[in-house]
Amino acid sequence: MKLTPLHARFGMAVDDVDLRTVTQDHLYGAIREAFEKHSVLLFRGQQLDDAEHVRLARLFGPLENRDAMASGRDVDFEVSAVSNVLGEDQIADPESLHTLNLQGNMLWHTDSTFLPVPALVNLLTAKVLPSTGGETELASTRAAWADMPDAMKEPLKNAIIWHRLSHSRSKISDELARLSSMTQWPDRPWRSVWPNPVTGAEALFIASHAFAIEGMGLEEGQDLIERAIEFCTRPEFVYSHQWSVGDVLIWDERATLHRGQPWPYGEARTLKSICCSVTRDDGLDSVKIV
């Protein structure tokens, strides 16, 4: 594989790889090594259909099936469409709750911190793109944690941070935050620092879903969370990706924040996303509250 840096501190573009050919015994080991080391991988010009997307994701671990998690029973897995296109090619109204929820993804976040098991990875690919906008930005919470001033870092080192999906959505719309799909998940605590089990490098585990720090007053904790996210998303820690159809971005949810950027909402934009859940081999026990 040919690796080219995307950013001075993290991320690699991977050339000369057709992801449809990757198997456990062919290239996955090298891809996983690069993933652990660099946090973000970009594969350009791919042609993954849903079945190939699923097959690739399974190499990283258990597919995150939120419908099954919420219902407590087996539910067939479906690849998630991050899209403003509804049935029969209808584009969602810019003022609709559907579009407001997409705008929730424009807050700096880490996927799935509000779930019973957090995400290890997101594999995101571009299918339909607007004429302008719609970039995906990623910030390295590993690089930021290494550079964070001691005065901010000290109270975060051994912190327990609580996460709630409706908290992030309330920043967009109170009506959106009250939907049952936003309130169905109990508040979830995680330790604040995630050491990579392969490299040992530490990253701050935080998200727009984070609403409290255990042992702190609510306002004090939220202020520290906001300041920490602001620090982690300074330009020197951020890579902004301008999509082309067929691009596949794979990122480490343990060591990054990400957000989408606006686009003309009258134009279609569809990305396909699969997250895989963390396992004990991925360091789950280091952040889990027993």
Image: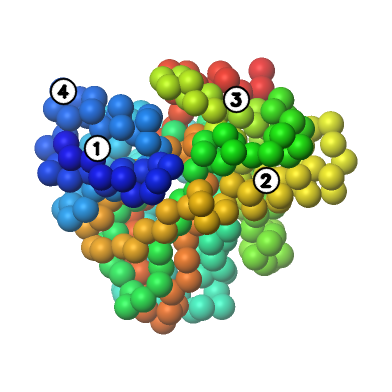
Distance from disc 2 to disc 3, alpha carbons, whole Å, reads 18 Å
Q: Secondary structure at mark 1?
A: helix
Q: Percent position (x, y) of residue 260? A: 47, 61
Give me the residue at 43% from left, 54% from top: 239
Compared to 227, does 242 lie above or below?
below
Distance from disc 3 to disc 4, alpha carbons, whole Å, reads 30 Å
Distance from disc 4 to disc 2, alpha carbons, whole Å, reads 40 Å
Please indicate whether residue 22 sits to the left or right of residue 157 in the image: left
Residue type at mark 4: give it: Asp
Query: Residue 13 versus residue 177: which sits nearer the camera?
Result: 13
Image marks 2 and 3: residues in contact by CB distance under 8 Å: no
Dot 4 alpha-carbon crowd within 10 angstroms: few under 14, some 14 to 19, many 20 or more: few
Distance from disc 2 to disc 1, alpha carbons, whole Å, reads 33 Å
Say which mark, if any, is on residue 8: none
- Which mark is nearer the camera, 1 or 3? 3
Q: If you read the primary sequence from the N terminus, does the residue marked by circle 1 or circle 3 appear first?
A: 1
Dot 2 alpha-carbon crowd within 10 angstroms: few under 14, some 14 to 19, many 20 or more: many
- Residue carrying label 2: 228
Residue 279 appears in the picture as rendered: no
Please indicate whether residue 70 sits to the left or right of residue 156 in the image: left
Say which mark, if any, is on residue 56: 1
Q: Quadrant of residue 25 in the image? A: top left
Q: If you read the primary sequence from the N terminus, does the residue marked by circle 1 or circle 4 appear first?
A: 4
- Residue carrying label 3: 287
- View extreme (bottom): residue: 266
Image marks 1 and 3: residues in contact by CB distance under 8 Å: no
Give me the residue at 17% from left, 55% from top: 45
Q: Secondary structure at mark 3?
A: helix
Q: Secondary structure at mark 2?
A: helix
Residue type at mark 2: give it: Ala
- Residue carrying label 4: 25
